[in-house]
Image: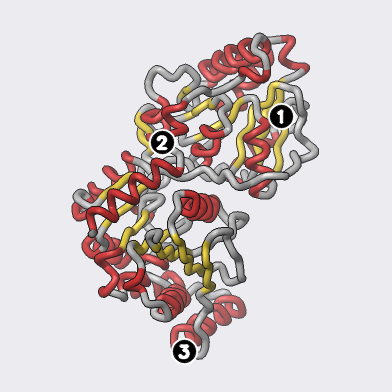
């Protein structure tokens, strides 16, 4: 009989955020490893993932938290008064958050949770509602793997992302309890595990690194019409959040085109995804025919673009020496086996995995080095047959595989037996 695993997560709609994409890939990888997976999710619409049994945790209504949350939203909408600062500084979270957490708890209680060998909470963005829900069920703590995808709370983010959120003190207290009561703590990155242990030492003996997974069950998706096939295509998909400026890349791409006359006719840089933080910057470049900016495509199309790219881009912060993040897209970029241009700080999980000897990486603001790397990649592309144009990192393909995930999960199951 396969081991039964319960996943509790905010969302399994891959279209709503990069966190949900990572969650879906994680769940599919567990299925591929032969586990019997049950999913409780709070997507607020019915969704099924092949090979699993998915249950929607419906929002509880007609209770005090739900009523108070409605009153808060009505007052804010009609009077323009933002109560959230006062409320979250007092309680740590909104009334809606507490109602959502209780809704998830109610759904978990419908199951005979003792039948599961492992209970994994996944989150997305700044929301850790599944973790808050599990804290209310102490009878399940000895089976609980709390997965932490990014630093939390926000005041624990490294520079340049740091700011103090509403309810910072209460959120810190909440995550201290997560660190104390979970059986295991999962992190996609070794540097993130070390970073979070610095704030919550209780994580130290519980940490296991489980990298983001590759969603290999997407097929039959057409490329977007703006994609130029048979060209030298440099592709970045995903949100360019504040702190991850493409300015160094854009300047470097421009220098590359100036240095390689032939490349001007067959090279394209695609930035596909939300980029509102850099609208003014992009406006200065938008008339260049080799630059293609697009506000976003579907999940399947983004994977298809990465598959068809000549070079896939990973862009991280430029004005820092440290990044503990593992971008969720890296797993797919590795698995499609195309060269990666990594624009990452000197100390980062991306560089740790690629290795210091990996040629095609630079800090994000070093436009001259970026131009040199693009020239090198372009000339190599020109002189390499398409069927031989590969990243060729079997070690990283193994690291991001479902087999490696299975090994980590088996170690946890053996430890809790």
Q: Using the image, determine if residue 191 lies above or below residue 255.
A: below
Q: Is residue 325 visible?
A: no
Residue 386: x and y, percent? 67, 19
Question: Residue 371 at x, y = what percent?
Answer: 58, 17
Alpha carbon separation for disc pair 1 and 3? 52 Å
Q: Position of residue 319 (x, y in %)?
A: 43, 33
* Residue farthest along the front direction in this orientation: 1
Question: In the image, which disc is placed on residue 399?
Answer: 2
Q: Alpha carbon of mark 1 to alpha carbon of mark 2: how far? A: 33 Å
Check disc 3: other Cα within 10 Å, few if <14, some if 14-19, many if 20+: few
In the rendered image, which quarter contains the N terminus? bottom left
Q: Which labelled disc corresponds to residue 204?
A: none
CA neighbours of label 2 inside 10 A, class few (<14), some (14 to 19), many (20+): some
Query: Helix, strand or loop at disc 2?
Result: helix
Relative to 230, 387 lies left or right: left
The residue identified by callout 1 is 291
* Rendered position, 401 above or below 251: below
Per the model, the C-alpha gap separating discs 3 and 2 is 46 Å
- Given this view, does label 1 or label 3 mark the residue nearer the observer? 3
Residue 330 seen: yes
Mark 1 or 2: in front is: 2
Callouts 1 and 2 close, C-beta under 8 Å: no
Name which residue lies at 78% across and 36% down: 226
At numbered mark 3, what does the secondary structure look like: helix, strand or loop?
A: loop
**Residue that badge 3 annotates:** 63
């Amino acid at each position: 009989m396969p081991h039964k695993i319960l996943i509790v997560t905010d969302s399994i709609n891959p279209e709503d955020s990069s966190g949900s994409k990572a969650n879906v890939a994680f769940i599919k990888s567990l299925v591929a490893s032969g586990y019997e997976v049950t999913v409780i999710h709070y997507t607020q619409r019915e969704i099924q993932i092949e090979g699993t049994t998915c249950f929607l945790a419906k929002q509880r209504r007609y209770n005090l938290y739900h009523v108070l949350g409605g009153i808060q939203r009505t007052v804010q909408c009609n009077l323009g008064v933002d109560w959230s600062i006062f409320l979250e500084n007092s309680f740590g979270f909104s009334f809606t958050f507490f109602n959502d957490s209780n809704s998830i708890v109610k759904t978990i209680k419908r199951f005979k949770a003792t039948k599961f060998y492992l209970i994994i909470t996944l989150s997305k963005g700044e929301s850790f509602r599944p973790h808050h829900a599990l804290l209310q069920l102490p009878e399940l703590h000895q089976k609980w793997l709390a997965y932490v995808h990014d630093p939390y709370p926000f005041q624990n983010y490294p520079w340049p992302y740091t700011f103090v959120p509403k309810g910072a003190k209460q959120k810190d207290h909440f995550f201290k309890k997560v660190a104390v009561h979970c059986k295991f703590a999962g992190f996609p990155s070794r540097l993130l595990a070390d970073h979070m242990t610095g704030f919550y030492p209780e994580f130290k003996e519980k940490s296991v690194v489980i990298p983001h997974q590759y969603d290999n069950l997407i097929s039959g998706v057409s490329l977007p019409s703006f994609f130029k096939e048979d060209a030298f295509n440099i592709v970045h998909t995903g949100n360019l959040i504040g702190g991850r400026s493409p300015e160094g890349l854009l300047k470097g791409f421009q220098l590359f085109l100036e240095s390689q006359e032939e490349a001007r006719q067959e090279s394209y840089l695609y930035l596909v995804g939300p980029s509102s933080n850099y609208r003014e910057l992009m406006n200065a470049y938008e008339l260049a025919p080799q630059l293609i900016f697009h506000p976003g495509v579907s999940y399947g199309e983004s994977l298809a673009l990465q598959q068809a790219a000549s070079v896939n881009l990973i862009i991280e912060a430029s004005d820092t020496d440290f990044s503990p993040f593992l971008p969720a897209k890296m797993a797919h970029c590795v698995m499609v086996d195309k060269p990666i241009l990594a624009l990452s700080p000197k100390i980062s999980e991306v560089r740790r995995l690629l290795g210091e000897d990996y040629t095609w990486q630079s800090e994000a603001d070093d436009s001259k080095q970026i131009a040199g790397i693009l020239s090198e990649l372009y000339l190599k592309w020109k002189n390499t047959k398409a069927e031989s144009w590969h990243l060729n990192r079997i070690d990283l393909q193994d690291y991001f595989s479902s087999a490696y995930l299975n090994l980590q999960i088996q170690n946890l199951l053996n430890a809790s037996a």
